[in-house]
Image (cartoon, rainbow, N blue to C red):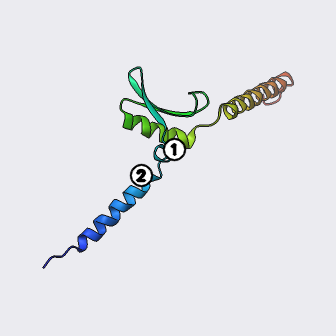
Amino acid sequence: AFDISHMKVTLQQEFSIAAYEMQRPSVLYRPSVASDGNKWCALYGPNLMEGVCGFGDTAAKAMDDFDQNWLKQKTPVAVRMEKQAAKIANEEALEERLNNDQFGVGA
């Protein structure tokens, strides 16, 4: 009398959604959430410089931003090293360009 076969598919989808949500960094690591001025801040770590954070107009948006930053944010040391490497590469390129101009190469 009752055909509930469609419920199986619906339940499978709901379990998949729940499993995905439980894998989010904001769920696994449970950052602290507090208001910061007119925004919400989700912070994991001792402070903004040493931890991972996310900001948003709502706590949910702050958690979404936290998730994105968790996946892409680098340590302060790694950022400094990348900047230093870029600076060295730019200086070498400038020096090479000046050397080529001096000898008339590429004219």
Point out residue 99 in the picture as x, y percentages from the top left corner: 84, 25
Residue reaching furthest top? 37
Residue reaching furthest bottom? 1
Residue drawn where x is 70% and y is 32% of the image: 77
Residue highlighted by disc 1:
29
Q: Which mark is residue 21?
A: 2
Residue drawn where x is 34% and y is 62% of the image: 13
Disc 1 on helix, strand or loop? loop
Q: Quadrant of residue 75?
A: top right
Label 1, label 2: how many angstroms apart (C-alpha)?
13 Å
| Rendered position, 95 above or below 12 | above
Front-most of residues 105 and 34: 34
| Rendered position, 84 above or below 37 | below
Front-most of residues 67 and 104: 67
Residue reaching furthest right? 103
Front-most of residues 86 and 96: 86
Residue kind at label 1, given as amino acid type: Tyr
